[in-house]
Amino acid sequence: MDYSIETLPLEKLLCDCLIVGVYQDQQLSPTATALNAQTSGLIDKVIKRGDITGKNAETILLNALPDSNIDRILLVGLGKKDNITAKNYRAALTAAANSLKKSAIKTVVCTLAETDVVDSNWQWKSRQIVEVFNDAAYQYTAHKTNKEIDCKLEALRIHVPVDQSDAANKGLTQGLAIAKGVALAKHLGDSPGNVCTPTFLAEQAQAIGTQSSKLSINIVEEAEMQALGMGSFLAVSRGSRQPAKLICINYQGGEKNAKPIVLIGKGLTFDAGGISLKPGLGMDEMKYDMCGGAAVLGTLQAAAEMNLPLNIIGLVPSSENMPDGDANKPGDILTSMSGKTIEVLNTDAEGRLILCDTLTYAERFNPEVVIDLATLTGAVLVALGRVPSGLLGNDDALCNDLIAAGNTAIDSLWRLPLWEEYQEQLKSNFADLANIGGKDAGTITAACFLANFAENFRWAHLDIAGTAWRTGPAKGATGRPVPLLCQYLINRASA
């Protein structure tokens, strides 16, 4: 879909549909007020009939406009005028996008950027329009014989006053970059495990590397991992016929000697659980166990497109976790790259085994901060559901910055404790630590395990197992937390 900023006055607009906001207290937005006057009070009549109350995320499509150069109006409920939050605004945009995406409408002008949203500006509002509409239009058709796309929208113009066009264009630029990053993460996540292998992920990273002169790609192969002493990482791939890859993306947008921000994304392209085999029901969704890695690729692509003045390293440890005669077994003891030994009590707790060696590898970059993201534990879904991602870390300032970025991006986090007492659950009689801590506090003990390998830098861990994909009839990757990470990087660049 093509996106642009529109500054023409209402009477000169030509489009298949105009998206207009109405408030819950029966007040009209500025555009709705002008349009109401042009159409002999049509919008007032619709509201008085009770066809729309203005409640947040309500919509109604008016198909016939007498004596107008606009074919249709989509009225969108915004909620109470004086208390429209960022979440309300996103909900209204989502409702608008969903109501239009299966229609025959091809060209749209959206006037919702004029909405007064608490603690927001024209740049942010314009960015949200692009992100929401692009997300709604996404459809995975790579392996369908009928590749017809449900969404017929071809062009969306964001209507803003002339004096706000510069801010809106900045939002448009950011929104396009983030939306493309989200779409990439969703596409990779939705790809089946027989296509999206560690080698395939490495190839996607190399393709991203061609998009900017500031990007360089290095793929660490298993032989080099062996030389580095990555015994924990390599143990996971032993049961697979697909060779493991450590994908390294280097974006040099900042000063040469500036410390980089390191993003690490778990890239398990399929997780059968290994010898500790998962139940068959729902195992198909374990193709999504690489969504952390997909989000890192999407974020690095977006950062390069936004030309952020930062140095960023993306690391994606990628493997499969399969049952095999050579697979690692419960009771095995592994030696990690750090030298710490690990007793494997459950081979299905494999994500932390590839992440711990990658955290040690990250030290060579002398990072400013390290943020890892992983579909790590089912326990986070029990604790937090599918609304926020879990956050744990060893640095309050970093965690607070991430929470603030999540609030701005509407890609929320909730912080859980990382207290020393939980380390007791990881004690082993036979190794330095065990790879699981029992049934209690599973998300926390998984992060506590990783904390043992993040002692030399500021570090945060995002558990995205509840937010990286949807299940049921709407099954599919969400692209989270690409918006959150991009907002964090935008904030860092602004600072």
Image (tube, rainbow, N blue to C red):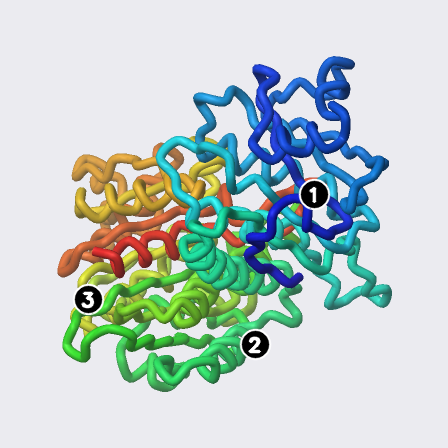
In whole angstroms, how far apart are the C-alphas of marks 2 and 1? 42 Å
Q: Nearer the viewer, mark 2 or mark 3?
A: 3
In this figure, which residue is indicated by the disc labeled 1? 18
State whether residue 270 is above or below residue 383. below
Q: Nearer the viewer, mark 2 or mark 1?
A: 1
Which residue is found at the position 52% from the left and 47% from the top?
A: 160
- First in residue order: circle 2 vs circle 3: 2
What type is the residue that disc 1 sits on? Leu
In this figure, which residue is indicated by the disc labeled 2? 200
From the viewer's side, name the closer residue of 322 and 160.
160
**Considering the numbered disc 1 on the image, is that residue within a helix, a strand or a loop?**
strand
Give coordinates of residue 441: x percent, y percent: 35, 34
Q: Can residue 341 be spotted in the picture?
A: yes
Which residue is found at the position 48% from the left and 35% from the top?
A: 387
Which residue is found at the position 52% from the left and 42% from the top?
A: 113
**Considering the numbered disc 3 on the image, is that residue within a helix, a strand or a loop?**
loop
Q: Determine which quarter of the picture holds residue 230.
A: bottom left
Relative placement, left or right, of 82 versus 362 is right
Q: Determine which quarter of the picture holds residue 212.
A: bottom left
What type is the residue that disc 2 sits on? Phe
What type is the residue that disc 3 sits on? Pro
Give coordinates of residue 472: x percent, y percent: 69, 40
Q: Nearer the viewer, mark 3 or mark 1?
A: 1
In whole angstroms, how far apart are the C-alphas of marks 2 and 3? 27 Å
Q: Residues within 10 Å of mark 1 (few under 14, many from 20)?
A: many
Q: Which mark is residue 367?
A: 3
Q: Quadrant of the C terminus?
A: bottom left
